[in-house]
Image: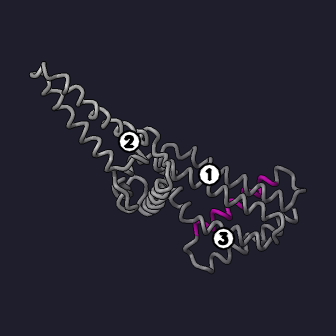
Amino acid sequence: MSDKLIEEAEAKTEGAEPKSEGAEPKSEGAEPKSEGAEPKSEGAEPKSEGAEPKSEGAEPKRRRGHLRVAAILESAGALFAQQGYDAVTMTEVAVRSGTAIGSLYRFFPTKETLADALLKRYAERLDGALAGLERAARNMPLDAFADALVEHALAWGAQRAAALVLIEARSVGGAQRGKLRAVLHDRLAEAVAAINPKLPADEVETKARVLQLIFKMAAGNAGEGEGVLSEIRALARLFLRERVAAG
């Protein structure tokens, strides 16, 4: 239901109250009034329907709703990365995303639910991207895989910045941080095992942690210029050749 219909329903519902109060003096004419009240009670139903998105915490059911949520999340992520979690207000998110403040609260009742949604989306997207990279590791030359790993880190740098701000700022950050680390570590461990299936499990874990550090290094230095990034690529190539493929 649109905001306009919700407002109309509220106006009808509010307008029905004086009618019921005014019916008391005219006891004889009460029957026609009671019959006329039925359309007013029907007008209240759209308002109750409009409450459902709030109870669900903003589960959009139409394409327009999905697009609106995507715009809100993109805007919120950029604001959190720039200003920090505590400094950002829901009003700023609404303005930047071009969303009415009422609609924003229907999708995300609190700033905390908005932050949780951002962290969840980051983990899901990172997992999907690294899953593709892990599959490519089976047939990709080592240097090409190293370069692809760095490029993935650079592509996720901006979102990672927002995620780290949220992790650092919120009391549940430890759990969320652990989930993100697990996603990154598990996918890199699968890639290490694919490159060198002969490696013992403990070495796979250790080498995956080193690749994780290289990934974070690249993501954290995306704005340092090509000279720094070139050195990070060289480091990734050397590690994969000398420490992973060669055992």
Quadrant in the picture for the C terminus: bottom right
Mark 2 crowdedness (10 Å alpha carbons): few <14, some 14-19, many ≥20: some
* Residue holding disc 1: 180
For image coordinates 12% across by 19% down, the residue present is 28
Give the magenta-colored segment's residue range.
204-221
Amino acid type for the residue under numbered disc 3 = Glu
Q: Is residue 214 magenta?
A: yes
Tell which tag, 1 or 2, sits nearer the viewer: 2
Q: Nearer the viewer, residue 75 or 61?
A: 61
* Residue holding disc 2: 50
For image coordinates 63% across by 57% down, the residue present is 126
Mark 1 crowdedness (10 Å alpha carbons): few <14, some 14-19, many ≥20: many
For image coordinates 82% across by 50% down, the residue present is 202
Residue 116 placed where, x, y %?
50, 47
Q: Is residue 220 magenta?
A: yes
Upstream in sequence: badge 3 or badge 2? 2
Q: Nearer the viewer, residue 89 or 105?
A: 105
* Residue holding disc 3: 151
Upstream in sequence: badge 1 or badge 2? 2
Task: Determine the residue located farthest toward the top in the rendered image.
Answer: 27
Amino acid type for the residue under numbered disc 1 = Leu
